[in-house]
Image (cartoon, rainbow, N blue to C red):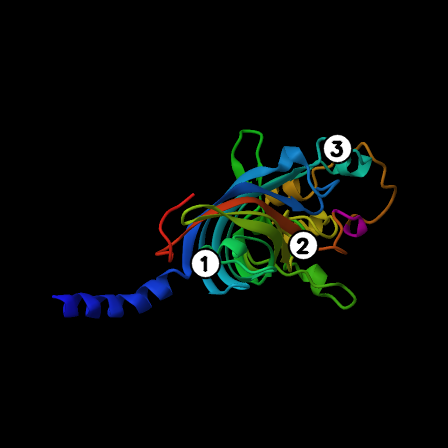
Amino acid sequence: MIKKTVLLLMLSLPIMAFSQKWEAGIFGGVSHYNGDFSEGLIELEHTHMALGGLLKYNYAEKITLRGGLYYGTISGDDVDASDIIRRDRNLHFTSTITEFSLVPEFNLTGYNISRNNLRFTPFVYAGLGVFKFNPYATSTTGGQVYLQPLRTEGQGAQYFQQPGKEERKPYALTQINVPIGVGIKFRLAGNFTMTIEASARKVFTDYLDDVSKTYISDDIINSLGGQELTGKYSDNRLGIYDYGSADINSIPRGNSTYQDWYYYHGIGITYTFFPPRCFKF
């Protein structure tokens, strides 16, 4: 009986040693974006609740590999803009964002939930992710009008394939990003760790909000199939700003010089499996 017990313990030790490196938990916080509808880094009226799930592997005391699944919302609206050109543009958008990312966390002073001197650390991270977005506007009847299929800036039109014109291709709704973040983590109680973080997502598109370049003329809309919705959601100007005699295809609708960003900030709580010490406060 003793031999069997000793053998069982010997076999279980590698499993316990491996398991104690794993953490799983949840994330809760806020999401927002920065782009052609922004007047500052954070606009409280366009900050939304965000949720996520976390799975971590503590490779070493200073390195944690983290997989994250996040869900949030971004939005923007010209209605309250301080700039007259933006108010005249009279556009708005909302988009949910679902993201999966895999990043290494670098624990600057080291972290080990079982060691008294390593139960708190600042950390930074950067890695890769893939995300899905789909910007839409709200119609006067309250319905959702998805903007990417409308090609509101003439994406795919023959006009922009002429010599001397910058080609405009329809943007993909699933793309890669680079998550970048900073935060602190500390042992909350027993097997639990809390993280507080602020993070940004570098993306490689300027169309999170469906706005980037210039307005398009009726003949371009007609070449795309002449959809009535394309004209309405491409150019919804109020007429409070005088553009003179400028060609509509040259009038800026957005600013393509800078690509969009989106952000997650919040708190994560994870549970470490089979820690080397019992639950203690």
Pointer 3 or 1: first along the chain: 1
Q: Disc 3 and disc 1: Cα gap in Å?
A: 51 Å
At horizontal 56% and vertical 58% (from top left) the residue drawn is 172
Which residue is tagged 3?
A: 238
Q: Residue furthest front?
A: 2
What are the residue bounds of the magenta stretch? Answer: 249-253
In the image, residue 159 sits, relative to residue 50, either above or below, namely below
* Marker disc for residue 56: 1
Q: Disc 3 and disc 2: Cα gap in Å?
A: 24 Å
At horizontal 85% and vertical 41% (from top left) the residue drawn is 243
* Residue 132 location (% of width, % of height): 52, 53
* Marker disc for residue 121: none
In the image, residue 267 sits, relative to residue 157, either above or below, namely above
Q: Residues within 10 Å of mark 1 (few under 14, many from 20)?
A: many
In the image, residue 82 sits, relative to residue 211, either above or below, namely above
Amino acid at dot 2:
Asp
Pointer 3 or 2: first along the chain: 2
* Residue 218 location (% of width, % of height): 70, 47
Nearer mark to the viewer, of 3 and 1 = 1
Nearer mark to the viewer, of 3 and 2 = 2
Which residue is tagged 2?
A: 206
Q: Residues within 10 Å of mark 2 (few under 14, many from 20)?
A: many
At horizontal 77% and vertical 56% (from top left) the residue drawn is 257
What element does badge 3 sit on?
Answer: loop
In the image, residue 90 sits, relative to residue 234, either above or below, namely above
Indicate the quadrant where residue 163 lies.
Answer: bottom right
